[in-house]
Image (cartoon, rainbow, N blue to C red):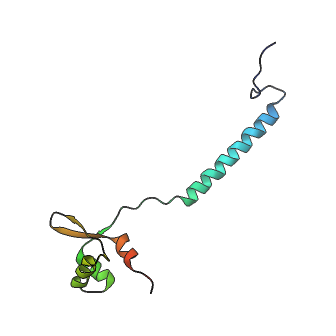
Amino acid sequence: MKNQNSNSITFDNLPSAVAKVSNEVSIIRNQLEELKNSFEPKTPDENLTRDEVAKILKCDVSTVHNWTVKGKLKKYGIGNKVYYKRAEVEAAIIAI
C-alpha cells in the first residue's frame, strides 16, 4: 500500500482542494490590499537653511540661532553650512 500525503490532490478531493486554494488566494489578496492601502513611501528628509527656517517660523534668523543654542531646534552641518530637517522643525512647534 502506498503512503499517501494528506495534502495530495486526487480526483475525488479536487473540488475541495480547489476551494481551499481559492480561499487562500482570497486571503492573500486581502492582505496585499491592506498592505497597499497602508503603504506610505519614505520621503527623503528635506534640509532647510537658517533663512528658510526663519521664514517658515516667521521669525528672525537670530531667533532660530537662539532656539538652536537652547536645544529647541537641532542643526546639522556640511562643511560650514548649517541645515535643519523640515520634519524636526515642524515637530518643534508644540501646542500651547
Left or right, 35 with respect to 92, comes to right
Vertical position of residue 42 compared to residue 8: above or below: below
Q: Is residue 65 above or below residue 28?
A: below
Q: Is 20 displayed left or right of 39 in the figure? A: right
The C terminus appears in which quarter of the rendering? Answer: bottom left
Residue lying farthest right? 12
The residue at the point 43 percent across, 59 percent down is 42
Picture residue at 66% right of the left edge, 52% below the top: 30
Q: Is residue 86 left or right of residue 4?
A: left
Image location of residue 80, percent across then percent down: 15, 67
Q: Is residue 93 above or below residue 5?
A: below
- Tell me which corner region of the image, top left, top right, bottom left or bottom right, holds residue 60: bottom left
Percent position of residue 86, x then y: 34, 71
Q: Residue at x 39, y 80 (%)?
A: 93
Return the x and y of residue 35 as percentages of the image width and height.
57, 55
Q: Quadrant of residue 44?
A: bottom left
Q: Is residue 70 above or below residue 43?
A: below
Q: Position of residue 45 (x, y in %)?
A: 34, 64
The quarter of the picture where the N terminus appears is: top right
